[in-house]
Image (cartoon, helix red, strand yellow):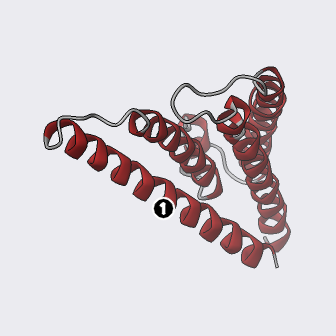
């Protein structure tokens, strides 16, 4: 059940990230074409490409938590075995959970609240829409951290 949920979440993130990447490529291509071929640079493409890149980066970081490919210092991980390694992984997950909850989720929601009336210059989007990726990616990371923690307990029970 957990594996099928993880697979669905992975596929959803990869689909949205793929769309963001295609949008980024299309807007940058249009920007180059309109600037150098038409001699009339588009005003909205730079902004849309920037926002797509931010969304792509944060969704990619969320996905990395799911596949345990995020930046990690593995010095102790290689030396510790058994229950000590599980305790270390729980500590790492707890620290990550605290940081993501406070910085990304709470901070992202506060940022969205402060920018609801602010519009982006070219697209006239509410900036809270642009910044909504912070709490979205935070929730995804928290889900992956919970799944990874549950996996730790499932693996320790099988041994």
For image coordinates 39% across by 32% down, the residue present is: 43
For image coordinates 67% across by 30% down, the residue present is: 127
Q: Is residue 141 above or below residue 11?
A: above
For image coordinates 67% across by 50% down, the residue present is: 81
Q: Position of residue 6 (x, y in %)?
A: 71, 69
Task: Using residue 105 as the reference point, say whether residue 52 is left or right of it.
Answer: left
| Residue at the disc numbered 1 | 18
Q: Of 35 and 106, which appears nearest the observer?
A: 35
Q: Position of residue 158 (x, y in %)?
A: 81, 73
Q: Quadrant of residue 144?
A: bottom right
Task: Using residue 24 as the reference point, say whether residue 106 is left or right of it.
Answer: right
Q: Is residue 135 above or below residue 112?
A: below
Question: Mark 1: few, some, or many residues within 10 Å (few <14, many ≥20)?
Answer: few
**Which quadrant does the C terminus fall into?**
bottom right
Q: Position of residue 125 (x, y in %)?
A: 64, 36
Q: Is residue 119 above or below residue 147?
A: above
Q: Position of residue 137 (x, y in %)?
A: 69, 45
Task: Using residue 56 as the reference point, say whether residue 117 is left or right of it.
Answer: right
**Which quadrant does the N terminus fall into?**
bottom right
Q: Quadrant of residue 16?
A: bottom right
């Amino acid at each position: 059940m957990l594996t099928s949920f993880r697979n669905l979440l992975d596929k959803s993130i990869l689909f949205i990230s793929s769309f963001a990447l295609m949008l980024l490529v299309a807007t940058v291509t249009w920007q180059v074409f309109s600037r150098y071929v038409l001699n009339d640079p588009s005003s909205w493409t730079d902004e849309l490409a920037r926002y797509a890149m931010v969304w792509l980066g944060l969704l990619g970081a969320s996905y990395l938590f799911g596949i345990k490919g995020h930046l990690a210092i593995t010095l102790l991980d290689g030396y510790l075995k058994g229950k000590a390694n599980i305790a270390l992984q729980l500590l790492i997950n707890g620290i990550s959970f605290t940081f993501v909850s406070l910085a990304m989720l709470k901070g992202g929601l506060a940022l969205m609240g402060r920018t609801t009336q602010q519009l982006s210059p070219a697209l006239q989007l509410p900036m809270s829409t642009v910044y909504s990726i912070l709490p979205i990616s935070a929730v995804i990371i928290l889900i992956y951290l919970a799944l990874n923690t549950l996996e730790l307990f499932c693996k320790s029970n099988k041994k």
